[in-house]
Amino acid sequence: MSGAPEAVVVGGGLAGVAAAVAVARAGLRTLHLAPKGPPDRRTSALMGPSVDYLRASGLIDDPAALGHPLTQIRIIDATDRLLRAPETLFDSKDAGLEAFGWNFPNIKLLEAFEAARASLPNLETRELALSSIERGATGWVLTLADGSVVEAPLVVGSDGKKSLVRVATDFRAREHGFTQAALVCDLELGRPLGGASVEFHYPEGPFTLVPAGGSRANLVWIDDREVLKAAQATGQDGLRTTFLEKSQRLFGDIQLLTPAHMFLLSTLTVERAGMDGIVLAGEAAHAFPPIGAQGLNLGLRDVADLAAALAATDRTAPGWANAVSTDYAGRRADDLERTGGMVDALFRSLLSDFLPAQALRAGGLWALRLLPPLRKRAFGLGMGRG
């Protein structure tokens, strides 16, 4: 890249790399601040529209080379509540789709994104963290961890839940922590899942097995954090016994392929996702429990709307960066409000001991099971189609 940057993208995660590629592909001289973090051994279930965007934007080529298709979603109410939901199977064929989406290892996705980033001559990457950001005479002044200073009219903050960009530029955010956490690891099952993601709904959260090819599965178990800590403390043999019980032994023997890691759960939402030449994307703008497969899907919709806002703005006009951030905020508002409400309501309904809430949830699943038009509408909402 020659010349001062027109945009700086902060954050080296999946949403951050995708945003850097999108900004550079829009023709801007782009600096990407991407400090290296520990390997992300989680997986991401990306719905069809997200996979379509990844292919169209050149971030991946063939999804089959990186991940595993998700063709069914099976929900089993494993609670002992008075009002239990019926076991429900959603099949992608009912929505006229070959698959709802794909389950990708985050490490493989990041490698593909970084390869796409490396091919862009107007995109420079520095493995440096941001130390501070403040308003300058003609844009935003960023001080980096090595003491160097850069200035750019447009800044994209994709630097996670504790985003320095968000905090330092006075964006208002609502945060809420849960007593629940998520335990994740990779498993080998005695019987393969095929293309079915299987969710066992327990009082403190779901125990979900996501197909990862062959007899492998990715586990996401949400429960009270103290319960998960106690389970971890039992070691591999104890965890194996717990997993057999939680999966109701439907898939034969279970072997742990990776260590089990725990992540605390919380929600975060901003009042608006862009202003004054600052754009927030990914978990800098929104974070939810891993319910409904909305995390990275929502982040990629951020990136797609950022690309659209850049394409719609005359960058030769004064104040173009402000115009981009305002346009972006408008494009994201409805999706963020709708998705945030949907995920929050779903998560709280799974945990609620309030009898009417249980009745509504059970009745809702019965309706989805029996009414194809409603089921099709739910598919569309879950895939971010509104």
Image (spheres, helix red, strand yellow):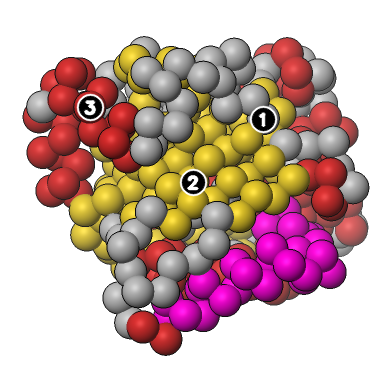
* Residue under label 3: 241
Q: Is residue 370 left or right of residue 155?
A: right
In which quadrant of the rendered image does the C terminus lie? bottom right
Whole-percent x and y of residue 205? 35, 55
81 falls in the magenta region: no
Q: Earlier in the sequence, mark 2 or mark 3?
A: 2
Instruction: Categorize mark 1 by other alpha carbons within 10 Å: few (<14), some (14-19), many (20+).
Output: many
380 falls in the magenta region: yes
Can the viewer see residue 8? no
Q: Secondary structure at mark 3?
A: helix
Q: Is residue 311 left or right of residue 344?
A: right
* Residue under label 2: 199
Residue at the (30%, 76%) spot, across then down = 353
Disc 2 marks a residue whose amino acid type is: Glu
Whole-percent x and y of residue 160? 43, 46
Residue depth check, mark 3 versus mark 1: number of the one nearer the observer = 3
Residue at the (61%, 55%) spot, across then down = 88
Disc 1 marks a residue whose amino acid type is: Gly
Please provide the residue range marked out in magenta. 357-386
Disc 3 marks a residue whose amino acid type is: Thr
> Is 313 situated above or below 97?
below
> CA–CA distance between discs 3 and 1?
25 Å
Can the viewer see residue 375? yes
- Labelled disc at residue 195: 1
Instruction: Categorize mark 2 by other alpha carbons within 10 Å: few (<14), some (14-19), many (20+).
Output: many
- Residue 128 occupies quadrant: top left
Whole-percent x and y of residue 305? 76, 55
